[in-house]
């Protein structure tokens, strides 16, 4: 809480208390009017703190001036309600203590000095009999005691001793309050600063943690939530556990949690989250730690996939070697048989057999390509040069006769550092696939652009397109959307493996009836 409303509230309460005290002792004072006027004056100048210019934080001089006005008003109140014999005189210590707490010990001691000076004026008036109102000792009359004659400074022979005793007592109380509260306030401020620093350090550490941390009170209020926790739980505005997404299941788990530790896993927003509840005592707060395992699972899946691919590469090399030699012998034998004057029926069957052998040969060739995807040395090359080379080879293919390839001019595309033959292999495969998907006379767009640090070489056709189910299996080995006998299902699988080996990827955009666009993404060469 800021010190402005605290000062205002305290001063208004004090003015009201003095007004009530004056009303209760009205039978012992000549008139209530001066006392109530003092209380009204306190309330009025206290209202200056409500001015808009002081709503932030009043300057020290204003606080000090208002406290001094409090002392002046209090001196007037004492004068009209019993002078130095009023027990309320010790309220001077309140202003000195307030200055020590709000400002500093030095200002508290200064107000202690001013209060002693004001009280000395009252004492001087009592000593010379010019200021006293000569009514029967307000505080004693209020208590209905009959000992006023014994302590009346006007009647007692120990008059000076009485006066000295009053100022000595008031000095001890006032200066003691200023010093004591000043030291206490200084220690509290130092402790508060230390706690703030510790709290900020804790918040910083918790906010940079890669895990989410919640702290719940016994009433299930959210006492604290770091940034990852609010992101995971969607709890940026949450104040209670009821405000959290029910899909997390935190409310149910928290209601039956007995401690000290419980761990469970939930699937939330496409993520795999591990939630850990912990508490140190049955009645203490509960901590909830949220850890995202999604990336870890993805990395583990990637490691397992690469391990499988390495094993598959070794297996593919062995298969290609064992199958390649027999296929060559079979193909040569069929060619010799075709040269004989065999009946047409036999020649037809030999032709079908040769087509199957050729298909097996293409599979073996793709397997060999997959088993050696990283062969060759990287070099800096222009994407346009790779496009031109792939296009020249594609034009020698029979499938290029039925389509038109439109190469879109691209400017400002930086060089890439790759194994050129492997990238040409990918582009050639994408062009052949686009030709297979296109109708006779169809057009294929072939272009390269640079965007967001990546070189993108795209091949777009206007064929039948693919649905989401086909797209999800597109890069799986031996999966193909072509007719039986027209594809091995290894072309995109091998191409995607080569792209990943170069730090890139192949993206696909396709929809039924809208054609397909395959985009090879590769990082630009370092230094460009």
Image (tube, rainbow, N blue to C red):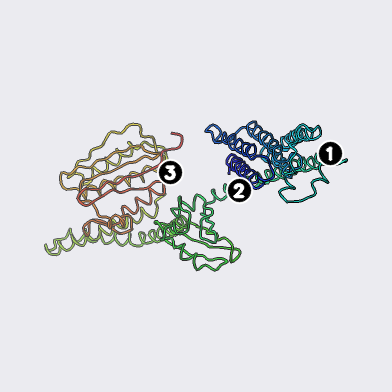
Q: Earlier in the sequence, mark 2 or mark 1?
A: 1
- Residue at position x 49%, y 51% from top? 228
Indicate left or right for 140 with 275 as reference: right
Image location of residue 349, percent across then percent down: 16, 63
Name the residue carrying label 2.
199
| Label 3 environment density (alpha carbons within 10 Å; few <14, some 14–19, many ≥20) | few
Labels 2, 1: front one: 1
Q: CA distance from mark 1 to mark 3?
A: 104 Å
In the image, taking residue 73 as reference, residue 274 lies left or right, namely: left
Tag on residue 520? none
Element at badge 2?
A: helix
- Could you say where residue 370 lies in the image, as x and y percent from the top left? 37, 54
Q: Nearer the viewer, mark 3 or mark 2?
A: 2
The residue lying toward the viewer, choosing from 182 and 197, is 182
Report helix, strand or loop for mark 3. Answer: loop
Image vertical order of residue 99 relative to residue 236, above or below: above
Q: Residues within 10 Å of mark 1 (few under 14, many from 20)?
A: few
Residue occupying the point 53% across, 33% down: 51
Q: CA distance from mark 2 to mark 1?
A: 51 Å
Quarter of the image with the C terminus is: top left
- 3D distance between C-alphas at marks 3 and 2: 55 Å
Residue at label 1? 164
Q: Quadrant of the N terminus?
A: top right
Determine the image quadrant of residue 31: top right
Q: Residues within 10 Å of mark 2 (few under 14, many from 20)?
A: few
Tell me residue 465's x, y (percent): 23, 51
Q: Quadrant of residue 22?
A: top right
Q: Nearer the viewer, residue 346 or 234?
A: 234
Which residue is denoted by mark 3 in the rendering? 377
């Amino acid at each position: 809480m800021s010190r402005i409303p605290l000062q205002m509230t305290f001063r208004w309460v004090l003015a009201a208390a003095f007004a009530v005290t004056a009303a209760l002792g009205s039978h012992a004072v000549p008139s209530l009017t001066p006392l109530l006027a003092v209380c009204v004056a306190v309330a009025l100048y206290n209202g200056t703190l409500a001015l808009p210019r002081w709503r932030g934080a009043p300057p020290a001089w204003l606080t000090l001036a208002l406290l001094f006005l409090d002392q002046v008003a209090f001196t007037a109140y004492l004068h009209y309600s019993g002078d130095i014999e009023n027990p309320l005189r010790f309220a001077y210590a309140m202003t000195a203590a307030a200055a020590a707490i709000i400002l500093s010990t030095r200002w508290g001691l200064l107000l202690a000095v001013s209060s002693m000076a004001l009280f000395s004026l009252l004492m001087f008036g009592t000593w010379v009999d010019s200021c006293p109102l000569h009514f029967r000792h307000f505080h004693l009359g209020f208590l209905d005691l009959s000992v006023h004659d014994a302590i009346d400074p006007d009647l007692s022979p120990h008059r000076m001793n009485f006066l000295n005793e009053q100022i000595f007592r008031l000095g001890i109380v006032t200066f003691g309050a200023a010093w004591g509260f000043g030291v206490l306030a200084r220690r509290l401020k130092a402790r508060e600063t230390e706690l703030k620093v510790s709290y900020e350090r804790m918040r910083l550490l918790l906010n940079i943690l890669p895990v989410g941390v919640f702290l719940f009170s016994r009433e299930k209020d959210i006492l604290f939530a770091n940034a990852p926790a609010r992101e995971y739980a969607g709890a940026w505005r949450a104040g209670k556990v009821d405000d959290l997404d029910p899909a997390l299941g935190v409310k149910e788990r928290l209601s039956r949690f007995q401690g000290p530790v419980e761990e469970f896993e939930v699937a939330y927003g496409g993520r795999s989250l591990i939630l850990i509840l912990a508490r140190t005592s049955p009645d203490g707060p509960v901590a909830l730690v949220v850890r995202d395992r999604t990336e870890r699972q993805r990395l583990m899946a990637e490691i397992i996939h690469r391990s499988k691919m390495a094993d598959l590469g070794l297996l593919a090399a062995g298969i290609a070697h064992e199958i390649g030699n027999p296929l060559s012998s079979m193909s040569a034998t069929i060619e010799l048989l075709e040269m004989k004057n065999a009946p047409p029926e036999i020649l037809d069957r030999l032709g079908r057999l040769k087509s199957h052998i050729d298909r097996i040969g293409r599979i073996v060739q793709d397997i060999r390509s997959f088993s050696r995807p990283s062969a060759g040395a990287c070099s800096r090359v222009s994407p346009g040069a790779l496009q031109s080379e792939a296009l020249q080879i594609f034009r020698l293919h029979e499938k290029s006769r039925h389509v038109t390839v439109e190469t879109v001019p691209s400017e400002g595309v930086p060089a890439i550092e790759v194994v050129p033959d492997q990238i040409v292999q990918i582009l050639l495969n994408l062009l052949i696939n686009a030709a297979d998907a296109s109708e006779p006379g169809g057009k294929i767009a072939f272009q390269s652009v640079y965007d967001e640090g990546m070189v993108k070489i795209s091949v777009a056709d206007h064929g039948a397109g693919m649905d989401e189910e086909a797209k999800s299996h597109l890069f799986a080995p031996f999966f193909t959307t072509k007719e039986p006998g027209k594809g091995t299902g290894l072309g995109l699988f091998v191409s995607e493996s080569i792209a990943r080996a170069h730090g890139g990827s192949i993206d696909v955009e396709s929809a039924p009836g809208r054609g397909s666009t395959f985009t090879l993404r590769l990082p630009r060469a370092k230094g460009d």
